[in-house]
Amino acid sequence: MGDGAMIRVGGGKRHVLLLQGPCGGFYRELQKALEARGHACTNVVINGGDLVDARFGRKLIFRRSFADWPAWLTATALRERVTDIVLYGDCRPYHRAAIAAMKPLGVTIHALEEGYLRPNWITCERGGVNGNSRFVDLDLEDIDDAVLAAREPAPETDFVGSQLRYMLAGINYYFCSLILTPFFPRYVAHRDLDILGEAALWLGRFASWPQRRLETRRALQQIARLGKPVHLVLLQLNGDSQIKDHSGFGSVRHFVEFCIAEFAASGSADTALVFKNHPLDNGVINLSKLIRDEAARHGLGDRVFFVDTGKLVPLLHEAISVTAVNSTACHQSLRRGIATLVLGKAVYNHPEIVPRMRLADFFRMRPVGRREHYERLVKLLRLTCQVNGSYYGKAGRKVALGPLCNMLIDGGVPLDAFLKSSASESRTEAKTGT
């Protein structure tokens, strides 16, 4: 269906618009599942990758400039009687503009994201995710423990191999976006580089894999020979919204420089600082050189290391602390009782779970939050905004689609249901302005 498609919804049925989802077939299956329940569902296509992923499902094609996007979407929502919008991530330019345009119309915003408790979960929240999630501003003292104890989350099913499927789906999506660029000449990508630039970086990463693996092995050997306790720092992707939108750092470079400066200020001469790279880093920043140069500038060349490849768990076994902007890998350190500090907005960045203090002081003192508070939060997440499943792979989608459709149509279990009455009333008053 093109720009002139018309869809009418009546009888109390919902009309859901899907805006840029995870790469691959997840949106196609979600669309079919919603339509099987009698609701209208339309996939909005804005580039070649979206078009190929949508295939033969009901869709609307947007080929105009980004400046036309808010007005086009508003007119579409009014004409098509749109009730809900589902989008993957809430910080892409198209998604930001869509949220701003749809809220005044009373359209319900559902934001999807990778699971806060990944790898076996996906996230669905109304309004926003990550730094825009309601959990960021939640006071853990407002949780009604009696209500929380009375509910049990669904059992967790484990899924394997999703990262490879994720990469393959991404390659297909961006390849299709590239070859179909003439059909969407005014599309504005949300990534820092264009597709050819990204491809060049990834080809370089693949070519350098043996060398990077060798350098990782050497770094691990040096860390073992040094024999000092390890402060572990988990790196984000440079273009991630956790860095750009939900932290005070402009880039991963600034975060690295800050961590090394704070490590020097801590005076912790008997420890080492180890940076673990994100497994999907594309190499846009030469992190190895950056870390080496910054460490030398502070006179720490023999106690600061960069681990580019390999598994996280062995490093956690040696770590006495973990620092990140907002990495879901922090859940692994929190489960293990390792002192953890978060420097950006995160659903688990609460003073009862992670400390609020200067990083240099954290390196010296390493306070550990109370485990019961973390377990309460995890249970609350599973009951409200976490859906067991995966975007990538038939088994994961099969498990996720039913509960996710329930959440989209019925609203799921709201966070307010687990808050003390006084907290819920104050939130309601804040929304209504009374």
Image (tube, helix red, strand yellow):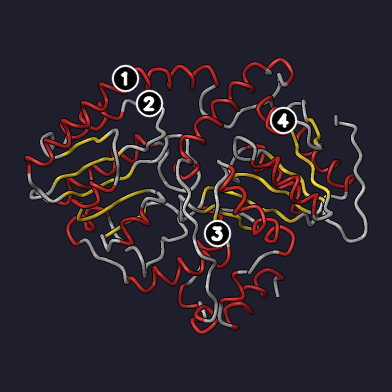
Q: Which mark is residue 386?
A: 3
Say which residue appears at 49% left-offset and 18% top-offset: 197
Q: Of marks 1 and 4, which one's residue comes earlier in the chain?
A: 4
Q: CA distance from mark 4 to mark 2?
A: 27 Å
**In front: label 3 or label 2:** 3
**How far apart, in angstroms, are the residues tagged by discs 1 and 2?**
10 Å
Q: Nearer the viewer, mark 4 or mark 3?
A: 3
- Secondary structure of residue under mark 1: loop
Q: Secondary structure at mark 4?
A: loop
Q: Position of residue 313 (x, y in %)?
A: 28, 48
User: Percent from the top left, x then y, of residue 82?
Assistant: 83, 50
Percent x, y for residue 257? 28, 38
* Residues under numbered marks 1 and 2 in contact, where contact means CB atoms less than 8 Å apart: yes
Tell me how far mark 3 sits from mark 2, CA to CA: 31 Å
Disc 3 crowd rating (10 Å Cα; few below 14, some 14-19, many 20+) is many
Q: Quadrant of the C terminus?
A: bottom right
Q: Give the distance between the C-alpha atoms of the residues marked 1 and 4, in whole angstroms.
A: 34 Å
* Quadrant placement of the N terminus: top right
Query: Would you name the residue on which mark 4 appears?
Result: 46
Instruction: Say left or right for 293 vs 168.
Output: left
Say whether disc 4 or disc 3 marks the residue closer to the N-terminus. Answer: 4
Q: Which residue in the structure is indicated by mark 1?
A: 208
Lower sequence index among marks 1 and 3 = 1
Of the residues shown, which amino acid type is indicated by label 2?
Gly
